Amino acid sequence: MNSKAQLKIQQMAFMLIAITIFFAIAGMFALTMSSSNNKKDAEFIREEHAMTLISKLANSPEFSCGEVFGGGQSNCIDSDKAIILAQKAIKYKTFWGVEDIEIKIINSDAEKLCNLQNYPDCNTINILNNETEGYPVSNFVSLCRKESFGGENYDKCEVARITVVTKGTW
Amino acid sequence: MKSKKAIQLPFAWIFASLVGAFILFLAIYISIKVIDTGNNGVDLKTGTEIGIILNPLETSLTDGQKTSFSLPVETRIYISCSEKNTFGLQNIQISQMSFKKWTDTNSRVSFENKYIFSRNYSEGKTFYLFSKPLEMPFKVADLFYLTSSKEKYCFIDAPENIKEELESLGQENIATKNCSAQSINICFSLKDNCDIGVDYAGKVVVKKLDRLYFEGDALMYAAIFSDKSLYDCQLKRLMQRIEQLSGLYRDKASLVSKEDCNSNLDLVALAGLARNFENQGDLVAINMLAEEIKQNNEIADCRLW
């Protein structure tokens, strides 16, 4: 083989390698752009979801006050249902597609976690706690329950903050 | 010398052709993969967004809510359901028109707390959704009815309450008069040209060979807008939720009884009926007990819901 032909093959080989590298880089750039768009979309969906999530949760049959405390109220959580739900957490682990649900009564007392023994002398109901990282969203709700005084029943409603942690990834 | 040169030239060409073909193959393969991944991503995103679109309909306190959404390309929305786990699953799969072909529907988005009724798949660019709560005897869930703008429904001789509800809903693909020739006719009395028959008093929806039994308007719409297999599956999922909610209210009843708040509702029997639910035939018994429990709850010392 003469040296001119060898040079030609070398040139061609280099050219082909250069073209491959060029397309690889262009492809990687396109992939990065598309992946960044996907991340933006996921973030947008997450924010969109978070905005309606709390209202949806508070008004779901498992939480809502219904007509127990007079008329259909929006963003009203039945405290008695919430404390029972906290005992059934395993069944509801994936039901709402969220990681954590916590309801905290707004008062100056130190945090006291509720269980069936100390309820209602407590201020924090921890319904779900999957202990994974995610995005917390919260809102204010009415937390209502039945109480009795001197043999008479009455409705007791307090302002509470419900915090929901949504999944970190979609 | 001449013959040697003749061999050298083709080798350069063979080498260039082989490597060129390899590069071309690689480029085409990667492009196809990237397009597939992109389509998959779009399908998943659309499915998730449909789930999110349903949220505002669930938060509203008013009865019967509607919404619509449009997608940039022709889309097929496949609605299916499974009864596994405590609450079963609502699956949404999306297939979109890409290069005159429908994309694969391998990826699905699933929700445990949603109940969508529609045909096996709805096709179009614009889709309508309306919701109605199911109460049996307490609110169980909001049921969603998904239709495409290509499907026109006409309710003929519907009872006044249904007519009023549908007219106030104002959904563009649902009419109660002046039916178009292409519309799917839903007749509430014996007529010609009926695609779906509804015996409102007998609580049954008749579709070709299928008879779908219902209790209440929410389940009547479910039977009208969905296939039998989806209707049966969603009914079972709804019963799974009734069973769990009955347990929740039963525990609440014992908790509030400590505050001299008594209710005395037969929620154990309701949970039992829901747990043993086999088919649409069991709906009658559940509804009868639910009605009794509902009346007792309304007159109880302490209402549970």
Image: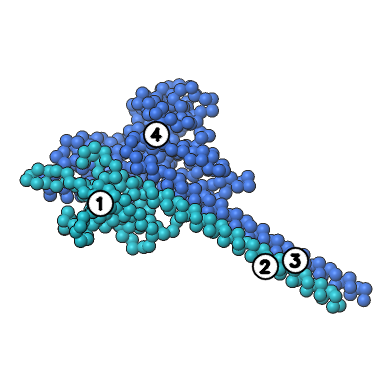
Chain colours: A cyan, B blue
Quadrant where the N terminus of chain A lies? bottom right
The structure residue drawn at horizontal position 9% and vertical position 46%, both measured from the top left corner, is: A149
User: Measured from the top left, where is residue A40 in percent x and y?
Assistant: 50, 55
Q: CA distance from mark 2 to mark 1?
A: 59 Å
- Is B159 rendered above or below residue A108? above
The structure residue drawn at horizontal position 36% and vertical position 42%, both measured from the top left corner, is: B58
Give me the chain letter of mark 4.
Answer: B
Read off the residue under disc 4. Answer: B221
Point out the frontmost of discs 1 and 3: 1
Residue B122 shows in this picture: no
Point out the frontmost of discs 2 and 4: 2
Residue B182 shows in this picture: yes
Q: Is residue A4 left or right of residue A51?
A: right
Q: Residues within 10 Å of mark 3 (few under 14, many from 20)?
A: few
Q: Earlier in the sequence, mark 4 or mark 3?
A: 3
Q: Residue furthest front?
A: A108
Read off the residue under disc 1. Answer: A160
- Amino acid type at circle 2 is Ile
* Tags 4 and 1 both on a single chain: no
